[in-house]
Image: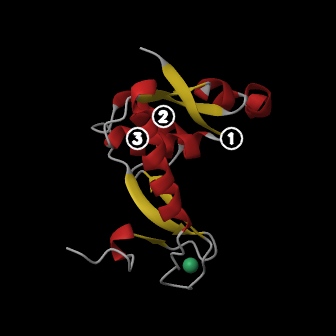
Amino acid sequence: MSYINLISFPNYLDAHLRLMHLQEQGINCWLKDENTVTIDPILTNAIGGIKLMVHEAQAGRAAELLRIMMNKEHEATPCPQCHSLNVEYIVTHRKAGNWLSAIATFLLGDFAMAPHKVYHCFDCGHEFSPGKSPEVSDT
Ligand SMILES: [Zn+2]
């Protein structure tokens, strides 16, 4: 089995969000140099960031899934409270939203602490569910 570096990220959260998305779709993938970058961010540029490694047989599908995911993220999703477009789709954890719980979830799996995905407005701090997004209409 061999893996290829599909894409690199400068920080843990971006890398982990993409990793979880691909794993939910059944893609065999993992993060390389995750610990190095998390422990010593100064090394990020030197080693090329956190690398999302994907099994080469699934690389084409993984790239397509990432492209769709990133396109969705860049669609304008205004904050329902203040109408700002400074909004990002993030993963939070209801009980303890910090890096340690994120890492624990990664190590222990989703049964430990189910990740909760929301849009976060960086202007007013409001968080809202993607289910309230206007483009989700066909159910
Ligand atoms: Zn807002």
Give the camera-side residue of 54 and 9.
54
Query: How many angstroms separate mark 2 from mark 3 (CA)?
Result: 26 Å
Amino acid at the residue labelled 3: Arg
Residue beneath the point at 40% across and 27% down: 57
- Residues at badges 1 and 3 in contact (C-beta under 8 Å)? no
Give the camera-side residue of 85 and 63.
63
Give the camera-side residue of 4 and 85.
4
Query: How many angstroms separate mark 1 from mark 2 (CA)?
Result: 17 Å
**x%, y% of residue 40?**
73, 28
Please say if 34 is above or below 116: above
Does residue 35 appear left or right of residue 133 in this picture? right
Q: Which mark is residue 120?
A: none
Q: Which mark is residue 61?
A: 3
Please say if 1 is above or below 127: above
Amino acid at the residue labelled 2: Ile
**x%, y% of residue 104?**
43, 33
Please say if 121 is above or below 21: below
Instruction: From the image, tell me which residue sits under label 1.
Output: 10
Q: Is residue 96 visible?
A: no
Mark 2 or mark 3, whichever is nearer to me = 3
Does residue 135 appear left or right of residue 83 in this picture? left
Instruction: From the image, tell me which residue sits under label 2.
Output: 103
Q: Quadrant of ligand 1?
A: bottom right
